[in-house]
Image: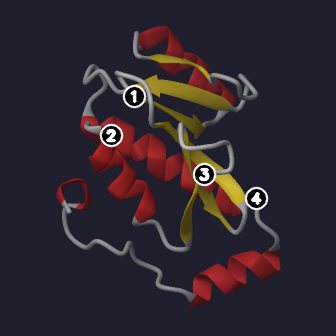
Amino acid sequence: MKKETLERLLASFPGAEETYPFGPEALVFKIMGKMFALVSQDEEPARVNLKCDPVDGANLVGKHESVTPGYHMNKKHWITVSLTGDLPDDLLADLARGSYERVVRGLSRADRQKLAGEESRPKCFGDVLNC
């Protein structure tokens, strides 16, 4: 998946915010102030950090060369995916969605209710990978 396509997907999740808290080299996607993805902006190939279940993350690291423990992150709960094209687009999209959902589950009840009041479907309908 191309970096731009991944960024559109991440931005399409309800309540997603795009920020550059670490400078122009890292685009951070947040929900209610909590990070769910970080996309490198100055590397080729680009990399994305995503929150992941520890067991699933360990399995992915063992099976896919482009998946490593989270770079500059808690390596138990985050993975880094190098956007080399080795990982199938649908798997990367599932990992991105899973990261978002994992962070949403960790939000306070009040924040989850506020988020539920927003658009419950992605901003891009249909095939979100091609929006």
How far apart in space, not on screen, are marks 2 and 4 (Cα)?
27 Å
Earlier-in-chain disc, 2 versus 4: 2
Query: Which amino acid does the dot numbered 4 rest on?
Result: Gly
Element class at badge 2: helix
Q: Is residue 87 visible?
A: yes
From the image, state whether disc 4 or disc 1 is nearer to you.
Answer: 1
- Can you say whether 129 is above or below 41 in the image? below
Q: Are marks 2 and 4 in contact (CB under 8 Å)?
A: no
Alpha carbon of mark 3 to alpha carbon of mark 2: how far?
16 Å
Residue at numbered disc 4: 106
CB under 8 Å between callouts 3 and 2?
A: no
Earlier sequence position, callout 3 versus callout 2: 2
Q: Is residue 99 above or below residue 119?
A: above
Mark number displayed over residue 124: none
Gap between marks 2 and 1 measured at Cα: 7 Å
Q: Local crowd at mark 2 within 10 Å, few (<14), some, or many (≥20)?
A: some
Residue that mark 2 sits on: 3
Front residue of 47/67: it is: 47
Q: Dots 2 and 1: beta carbons under 8 Å?
A: yes
Residue identifier under label 3: 20
Query: Which type of secondary structure does the marked residue at label 4 adopt?
Result: loop
Compute the Cα span from label 3 to label 4: 22 Å
**Residue, disc 1:** 46
Marks 4 & 1, CB-CB < 8 Å contact: no
Which residue ends up furthest to the front in the rendered image? 24
Asked if the residues shown at circle 1 and circle 3 are in contact, with their CB atoms under 8 angstroms apart, the answer is no
